[in-house]
Image (cartoon, coloured by chain):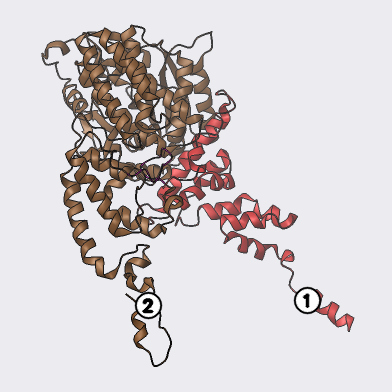
Chain colours: A red, B brown
């Protein structure tokens, strides 16, 4: 009896054994779910915090982003940071009126804001409080 | 009258009278309003007469009604409309006592025109509030066009009476100052300071009035504000950049225009008339890095005040920007030009190469050149034209603060900065950053009110005047495209979904708050043909042969 059960358990699918499938699933998640996934176990954390997954998330709505975007984003801090700092706020706030701006326009704006943030982090000459505060208007709740 | 149900003697049961709910109109009840079905036609009539009364009333009365906390329970629609009507007709006859007829049944916390605590006060369901707001547009916006000089577009608190008196007092004081009657003006300042204690100075008219009273008193006493050292100004500027959309709007719009003008060129040169912390340029560097066909060689020449105590701040900023450019693989070269005034800059200092595409960028700088005769603006514009730039980006405040008459200037400034402070409230509530941003604006207010002559540098002029100047100097307009417009709209939506607006006007973009324009961005290119000779224009006729 127990040997049957053991046999069955061995044949059951363990997702952690199929990293490529796991990656495909993670690529389709939204930001919040991805962050939650990163809390599950070490493997999931490693996969869910990899920049390539977040790159998928950032560029999901873009038809053909071109090859030049990735190196720029990586140099400025990575796609995960880009998403957390800029893209997700744009998605929520500009999402109310989807027809008004294209996903590429939104990405451009995100990249510009992201670059200003990178520049400020480089600085540190403006005192401690001013570091990365140029994007704080994105973090506060919107006064509707 | 006994219950009619006693006629059903046969059953011996008393059928209770109709419960009160069934007498109410069902549709309105769903929206949270209690109106008896039999009263509906009365309500309709009263709403009509309320509308005509509101239209014909002086708008400060109406805005008092609409902007304050609700005095009466709006759920009881009949008596609410009645009370509004009676208050309007009463106030119409006694315009000096707008608040005398208001019931003091609710003491509100001094609040903004859109009290989000309306729910707490009256537990009206939120869709009912939306209904009210859509029917009474005045509760959302200040009285629209165009306010006669004695009224202000910002009216917020229960102490609206004091607010209006304060504005009148400010105008009177300014007039006294213009006439030279400083003694009386000083006495009035004391009175106004006392009046300030009775209104809320945390927001709205109280706060703005406080700054103007301060500036007036400095002018009367003769002690202008000590100009802040450039380092401090830069810190305030930085906070102003962070907490409000104006500078971001300026930077992003100018960058978009420059990006489009640089299309196809491999060597590009940007001259920034006021580098500050260089916050405008990382975004341009990144956009150039991503442009199809690869980035050009970018040269940036930044003009700024000489730094105290031996530091070379310009060079430090340049190093930071170079680091950004290096990270995204854009060939970059920086050059700093230290000059305490823009008119001291000479074109040879900028080392412009004739083979490169040149962009000249001026964010709220050129108005400083509109000083008293001989005004340097014409000569500066002519040497800019002489450099043959591909594009000149100009962003300026959209208001006239350069009138010769003090009272006119003061009045314009009062309205303009009231609107600006109003919009600042919506953009940022985080202290102390907002306070620092306000200090930046306060510096401008002080300069406009306290100074005359060469010391007064905040000489804002509206876009129409700049158009004339640029046309005379040999430029023609370059239309800001739809990309700039889209980007600006998105940016403003990020700050606040209500209130900010971008409008396009003859190829220029204007950022406004509730349709009052605040900042205008435009772009210019050199007109083809020989450089125009200066026309004899009286005081402007000054040709610098350098």
Magenta residue check for B110: yes
Which residue is at the front of the view, A98 or B319? A98
Give the label, 2 or 1, closer to the camera.
2
Task: Identify the residue at horizontal 18%, vertical 10% (top origin).
Answer: B542
Which segment did they paint magenta?
B103-115
User: Residue B451, can we see it?
Assistant: no
Q: Are marks 2 and 1 in contact (CB under 8 Å)?
A: no
Crowd rating for badge 2 (residues with CA inside 10 Å; few <14, some 14–19, many 20+): few
Q: Magenta-highlighted stretch: main secondary structure?
A: loop
Left or right? Give the position of B215 relative to B537. right
Magenta residue check for B500: no
Q: In this view, does B42 lie above or below B152?
A: below
Q: Do labels 2 and 1 share a chain?
A: no
Task: Identify the residue at horizontal 26%, vertical 38% (top origin).
Answer: B98
Please name the residue that numbered disc 1 is placed on: A11
Query: Residue furthest toward the right?
Result: A2
Residue B33 image point, x, y percent: 35, 62
Please name the residue that numbered disc 2 is placed on: B17
Q: In terms of secondary structure, where does tag 2 sit? A: loop
Residue B425 image point, x, y percent: 41, 36
Left or right? Give the position of A38 relative to B147. right
Per the model, the C-alpha gap separating discs 2 and 1 is 73 Å
Q: In terms of secondary structure, where does tag 1 sit? A: helix
Residue A130 image point, x, y percent: 54, 29
Residue B245 image point, x, y percent: 40, 36
Q: Is residue B326 above or below residue B443?
A: below
Q: Quadrant of the N terminus of chain A?
A: bottom right
The residue marked by circle 2 belongs to what chain? B
Which residue is at the front of the view, A3 or B439? B439
């Amino acid at each position: 009896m127990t040997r049957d059960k053991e046999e069955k358990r061995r044949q059951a699918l363990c997702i952690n054994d199929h990293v490529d499938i796991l990656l495909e699933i993670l690529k389709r998640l939204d930001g919040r779910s991805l962050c939650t996934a990163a809390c599950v176990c070490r493997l999931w954390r490693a996969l869910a915090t990899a920049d390539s997954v977040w790159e998928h998330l950032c560029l999901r709505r873009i038809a053909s982003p071109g090859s030049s975007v990735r190196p720029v984003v990586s140099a400025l801090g990575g796609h995960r940071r880009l998403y957390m700092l800029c893209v997700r706020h744009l998605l929520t706030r500009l999402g109310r009126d989807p027809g008004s701006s294209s996903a590429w326009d939104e990405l451009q704006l995100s990249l510009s804001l992201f670059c200003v943030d990178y520049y400020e982090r480089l600085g540190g000459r403006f005192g401690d409080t001013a570091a990365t505060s140029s994007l704080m208007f994105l973090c506060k709740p919107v006064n509707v | 009258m006994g219950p009619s149900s006693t006629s059903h003697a046969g059953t011996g049961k008393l059928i209770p009278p109709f419960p009160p709910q069934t007498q109410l109109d069902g549709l309105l009840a769903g929206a949270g309003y209690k109106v008896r079905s039999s009263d509906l036609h009365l309500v309709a009539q009263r709403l009509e007469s309320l509308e005509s009364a509101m239209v014909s009333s002086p708008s400060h009365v109406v805005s008092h009604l609409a902007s304050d906390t609700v005095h009466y329970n709006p759920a009881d629609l009949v008596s609410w409309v009645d009370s509004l009507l009676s208050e309007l007709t009463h106030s119409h006859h006694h315009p000096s006592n707008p608040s005398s007829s208001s019931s003091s049944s609710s003491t509100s916390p001094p609040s903004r025109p859109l009290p989000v605590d309306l729910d707490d006060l009256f537990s009206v369901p939120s869709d009912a509030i939306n209904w009210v707001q859509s029917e009474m547009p005045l509760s959302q916006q200040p009285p629209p066009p165009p306010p006669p000089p004695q009224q202000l577009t910002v009216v917020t608190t229960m102490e609206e009476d004091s607010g209006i008196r304060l504005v009148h007092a400010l105008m009177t004081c300014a007039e006294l100052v213009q006439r030279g009657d400083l003694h009386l003006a000083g006495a009035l300042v004391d009175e106004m300071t006392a009046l300030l204690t009775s209104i809320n100075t945390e927001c709205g008219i109280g706060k703005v009035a406080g700054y103007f009273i301060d500036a007036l008193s400095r002018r009367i006493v003769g002690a202008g504000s000590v100009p802040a050292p450039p380092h401090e100004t830069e810190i305030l500027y930085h906070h102003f950049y962070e907490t409000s959309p104006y500078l971001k709007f300026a930077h992003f719009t100018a960058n978009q225009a420059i990006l489009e003008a640089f299309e196809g060129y491999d060597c590009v040169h940007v001259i920034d008339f006021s580098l500050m912390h260089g916050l405008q340029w990382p975004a341009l560097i990144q956009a150039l890095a991503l442009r199809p066909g690869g980035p050009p060689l970018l040269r940036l020449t930044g003009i700024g005040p000489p730094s105290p105590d031996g530091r070379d701040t310009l060079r430090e900023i340049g190093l930071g920007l170079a680091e950004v450019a290096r990270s995204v693989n854009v060939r970059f070269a920086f050059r700093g030009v230290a000059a305490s005034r823009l008119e001291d800059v000479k074109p040879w200092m900028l080392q412009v190469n004739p083979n490169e595409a040149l962009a000249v960028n001026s964010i709220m700088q050129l108005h400083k050149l509109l000083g008293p005769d001989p005004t340097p603006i014409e000569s500066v514009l002519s040497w800019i034209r002489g450099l043959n730039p591909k594009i000149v980006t100009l962003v300026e405040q959209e208001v006239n603060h350069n009138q010769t008459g003090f009272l006119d200037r003061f009045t314009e400034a009062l309205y303009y900065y009231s609107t600006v402070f109003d919009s600042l409230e919506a953009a940022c509530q985080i202290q102390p950053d907002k306070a620092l941003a306000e200090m930046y604006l306060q510096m401008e207010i002080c300069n406009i009110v306290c100074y005359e002559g060469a010391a007064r540098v905040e000489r804002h002029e509206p876009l129409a005047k700049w158009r004339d100047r640029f046309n005379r100097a040999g430029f023609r307009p370059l239309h800001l495209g739809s990309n700039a417009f889209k980007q600006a709209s998105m940016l403003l939506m990020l700050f606040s979904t209500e209130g900010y607006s971008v409008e396009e006007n003859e190829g220029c973009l204007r950022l406004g708050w509730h349709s009052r324009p605040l900042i205008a961005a435009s772009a210019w290119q050199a007109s083809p043909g020989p450089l125009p000779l200066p026309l004899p224009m009286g005081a402007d006729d000054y040709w610098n042969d350098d």
